[in-house]
């Protein structure tokens, strides 16, 4: 997309996502199938953390760097707390209002159990 449109910011996003994905794989943050170990929500947290860090480390666009630096710091400083919140939500059945047509509010509550991460993301946007 960045090559077709000449959008340099899109290229930076793509390059840093590639770096974040490599770190994610190197750090073995794939989800486990066991309760109270890293699940999909935790894996998504780590990809977000590593991407924010890569965006904060890049120097090609200082506006993007400044914007992502705060998010990278907040997520990094609260990593243990966020993982604790995500892992503690595991192991119990959750009502999402149905299998085929789940309620969006109930689903969001189930899939976003970390108040710390939610707060960091809300202040970012």
Image (tube, grey):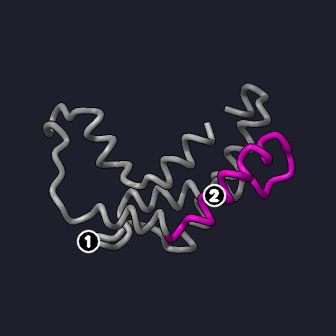
Q: Secondary structure at mark 2?
A: helix
Q: Quadrant for residue 123, please give it.
A: top right
Q: CA distance from mark 1 to mark 2?
A: 26 Å
- Point out the image quarter for the N terminus: top right
Q: Give the x, y percent position of residue 54.
A: 71, 57
Instruction: Tell me the residue at 29%/35% (across/down).
Output: 105
51 relative to 9 in the view: left or right: left
In what element is the residue under mark 1? loop
In the image, residue 46 lies in the stretch drawn in magenta? no
Marked residue nearer the N-terminal end (1 or 2): 1
Q: Which mark is residue 74?
A: 2
On the image, which quarter does residue 104 sit in? top left
Picture residue at 34% right of the left edge, 48% below the top: 111
How many marks on residues? Answer: 2
Relative to 68, is 93 above or below? below
From the image, give the main secondary structure of the stretch colored magenta.
helix
Dot 1 crowding, Cα within 10 Å, few <14, some 14–19, many 20+? few
Residue 117, given in percent of the width and then of the height, sits at: 50, 53
Residue 76 falls left or right of residue 106 = right
Position of 30 compared to 96: left or right?
A: right
In front here: 118 or 51? 118
Q: Which mark is residue 68?
A: none
Q: Position of residue 49 (x, y in %)?
A: 59, 58
What residue is rendered at 49% in x and 55% in y? 116
Which numbered disc covers residue 35?
1
Task: Specify start and end residues of the magenta stretch as a single range.
Answer: 55-80
């Amino acid at each position: 997309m960045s090559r077709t449109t000449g959008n340099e910011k899109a290229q930076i996003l793509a390059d840093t996502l590639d770096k974040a994905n490599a770190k994610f794989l190197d750090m073995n943050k794939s989800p486990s199938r066991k309760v109270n170990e890293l699940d999909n929500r935790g894996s998504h947290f780590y990809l977000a953390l590593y991407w924010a860090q890569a965006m904060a480390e890049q120097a090609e666009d200082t506006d993007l760097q400044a914007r992502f630096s705060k998010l990278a710091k907040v997520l990094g400083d609260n990593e243990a707390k966020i993982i604790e919140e995500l892992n503690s939500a595991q192991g119990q059945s959750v009502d999402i209002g149905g299998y085929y047509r789940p309620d969006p509010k109930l689903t969001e509550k189930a899939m976003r159990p970390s108040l710390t991460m939610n707060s960091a993301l809300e202040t970012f946007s």
